[in-house]
Amino acid sequence: MSSWTVPAGHRTTRLDAFVRRCLPYLSQREARKAIAERAFWINDRPARKGDRVFGGDVLTLKGFPHLLRQSPLPERNLKVPVLYEDESILALDKPAGMATHGFSGREIHTLANFLVAMRPSLYSIGRSRWEPGLVHRLDKDTSGIVLAAKDQASFVDIRSQFRRRLIKKKYWALVWGRTRREGLVAYPLIHDPRDRRKMRPVLEDGGKENQPRSWKAVTRFRALGCSQGFSLLEVDMDTGVTHQIRVHFAAIGHPLVGDLLYGEGRPDRFGLGRHFLHAFYLGFRHPRSGRDTVIKSPLPKELREIVDRLGIRSEFGSQ
């Protein structure tokens, strides 16, 4: 049990703000989540959302020891293939079902937990101890290449390349329906006000003031083969907005196979338990040598079996 006393004469403060003052490594979302879970008490009564604290109040954390952790716990038993490593960078082949990182000590079995077990020095690299060295992320159920920097200069350099859209990212995706041979989707994306888990495409300019913030998003694709009502695509993006590929293909009537969030009620036809999306290619300028660097990842076994089952072999076999 841990306690903090609000300083005498302290201005009235929102509870979530004071929690973050006491535990500054928690995000606002994690602080509010902990309050909703009744992790905190004020003067021996359970704290509630919307509470405020005053000088002399005592805030107590009862249970929830993970909230006192300031960085991911190392997990040495996770199995994540290393695709490439040198003195500056580390490229990992993240499996589907594994989050890239969490936002508090409650999350385990993430790529971040694996990274700090493998390379403890990464704790000090990056923007946050919850994202040790990680320069980008993939959705939990997207497999493929994730890049980490091993020193702060390399982290800053690669992040700058992402911001300037100098990084080349390519994915393999299996979608419902027969697509065009090539195409481009450029709908901006916004957070869905009805479901905080989702993003939503802006299909037309409403022209209204006070519109929700939107993010530019451009997705290109090329069909590698079609069979039995499915298309295997090579996809690349100029941008990297949350859920971008998944939202864009759902918007044009070709949701990803296995995507239950954006699949518009379509069943998990192949029993994947994940969506069919794999980040197979990452091209960038090496932060130390300046050389053009390319990292590739093979299609996971469970996805390869579906491609073979559908008989889609035309161009894919030569990738």
Image (cartoon, rainbow, N blue to C red):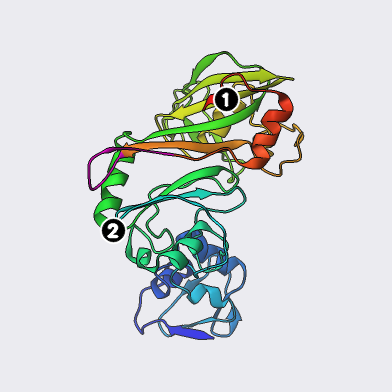
Marker disc for residue 316: 1
Counting residues from the start of the chain, the first of labels 2 and 1 encountered is 2
Pointer 2 residue: 151
Numbered range of the magenta stretch? 285-295
Q: Is residue 261 shown to the viewer in this render?
A: no
Amino acid type, mark 1: Phe
- In terms of image quadrants, where is residue 174? top right
Q: CA distance from mark 2 to mark 1?
A: 36 Å
Furthest residue in direction front, as rendered: 318
Q: In the drawing, does residue 247 fall left or right of residue 86?
A: right
Residue 77, x across and y down, in percent: 57, 66
Residue at (74, 31) in percent of width and height: 266
Q: Is residue 202 above or below residue 53?
A: above
Residue in front for this viewpoint, 57 or 270 = 270
Residue 305, x across and y down, in percent: 69, 35
Residue in front for this viewpoint, 33 or 291 = 291
Q: Is residue 89 shown to the viewer in this render?
A: yes
